[in-house]
Image (cartoon, helix red, strand yellow):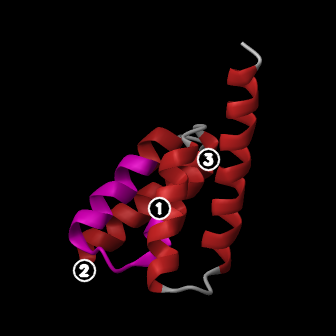
């Protein structure tokens, strides 16, 4: 439990510094210790959105929404992921 909290806090600190790749890595480490903690998934989804990894962000949000179908952050971040995926598809169609 203590290691989980430390990793999560380190991830949060990386987010505050704009170091999203490092933050996502910390949150992934947290998931190895506790797969039930939903905030870690929504936090990692935020990192993936910032890194334009929309499919990964969508998957994290889908996971949370399977457990808790009323999670507002997961709904919002999944919508942003879908938006990013649509923009990417439109750009690819124009190439």
Examine the rendering and report whether any part of residue 54 can be seen.
Answer: yes
Callout 3: SS: helix
Q: Residue drawn 61% across and 52% down? A: 16
Q: To which residue does mark 3 refer?
A: 49
Which circle, 2 or 1, is nearer the viewer? 1
Q: Residue drawn 66% across and 71% down? A: 75
Callout 2: SS: loop
Disc ID at residue 24: none
Q: Nearer the viewer, residue 31 or 89?
A: 89
Few, some or many residues within 10 Å of mark 2 (<14, 14–19, 20+):
few
Disc ID at residue 60: 1
Q: Residue drawn 39% across and 58% down? A: 27
Residue 92 left/right relative to 3? right
Q: To which residue does mark 2 refer?
A: 1
Q: Which residues are magenta?
A: 24-41
Q: Nearer the viewer, residue 43 or 8?
A: 43
- What is the spatial separation of the Cα atoms under label 3 and label 1, in whole angstroms? 11 Å
């Amino acid at each position: 439990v203590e290691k989980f909290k430390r990793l999560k806090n380190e991830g949060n600190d990386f987010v505050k510094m704009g170091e999203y790749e490092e933050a996502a890595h910390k949150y992934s480490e947290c998931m190895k210790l506790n797969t039930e903690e939903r905030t870690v998934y929504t936090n990692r989804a935020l990192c993936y959105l910032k890194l334009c990894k929309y499919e990964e962000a969508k998957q994290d949000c889908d996971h949370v929404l399977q457990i808790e179908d009323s999670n507002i952050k997961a709904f919002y971040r999944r919508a942003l992921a879908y938006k990013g995926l649509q923009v990417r598809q439109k750009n690819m169609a124009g190439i």
